[in-house]
Image (tube, coloured by chain):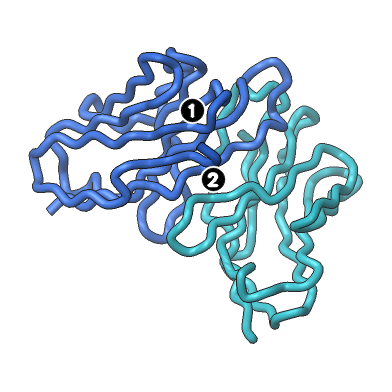
Chain colours: A blue, B cyan
Amino acid sequence: GAGVSQTPSNKVTEKGKYVELRCDPISGHTALYWYRQSLGQGPEFLIYFQGTGAADDSGLPNDRFFAVRPEGSVSTLKIQRTERGDSAVYLCASSFRTGSSSGANVLTFGAGSRLTVL
Amino acid sequence: DAKTTQPNSMESNEEEPVHLPCNHSTISGTDYIHWYRQLPSQGPEYVIHGLTSNVNNRMASLAIAEDRKSSTLILHRATLRDAAVYYCILRDRSGYSTLTFGKGTMLLVSP
């Protein structure tokens, strides 16, 4: 597609439930990023992939959060045993490859998935 | 990534120029200066980036101080659609680091 697609756009769940959020990046972009944004704050980095592998997962808050990108394209962010504090907008972005003087590479963001945990 | 400092908010009138400042006194020689903006209920979008020289594109201009310790994003004629949060971000030239967002500057544009 022309842009980064995220589904669902809105998800309401109950505390303790399992949630999956999907990201479909721009075709040809090998780098994929997940961020989380709480109200009034800037996006907070969670994890990024170069191809199929997680190159940096230092932003994942705890082991309830996990992300996969099995074929190097679509990625799924998985949250187990959701808590009310997980409520936020989850943003996905993609770009051309990271590394090798790619600091000028531009990230393209999706519109986000708004997660509400009751 | 080195830290940036931006005003919390700024106001402008429609069709007037807007200068959004960013201080980055601890910038390293290999850091790019990136600007992104986020419109209400949307993900951030790229605006412009530069390394040492001033840059222009269809959206904005980026003026970089000679010592690179500050920069200014210039919107030549603000429109209502430019009302957004603007983020100034440093990113190492290697590209191995991700974008680290601060709180940005909320730009309010009045008709």
Against A12, residue A78 (above or below) is above
Estimate the x, y position of residue B110 in percent, counting from the top left: 62, 83
Q: Is B37 situated left or right of B17 in this image?
A: left
Residue A58 against residue B45 in the figure, above or below: above
Q: Residue A17 sits in which quadrant?
A: top left
Q: Are marks 2 and 1 on the same chain?
A: no
**How many labels were placed on the picture?**
2
Are there few (<14), some (14-19), or many (20+) residues within 10 Å of tag 1?
many
**Residue furthest bottom as drawn:** B111
Amino acid type at image mark 2: Phe
Q: Position of residue B66 (x, y in %)?
A: 91, 46
Q: In this view, does A79 lie to the left or right of B110?
A: left
Query: Of helix, strand and loop, which one carries label 2?
Result: loop
Q: Which residue is drawn at 83% across and 43% down?
A: B68
Q: In which quarter of the image is residue A23?
A: top left
Q: Where is residue A118 in the image (x, y as percent from the top left)?
A: 12, 54
Q: Residue B101 carries which label?
A: 2
Residue at 87% over, 44% down: B67
* Residue placed under numbered mark 1 in the picture: A32
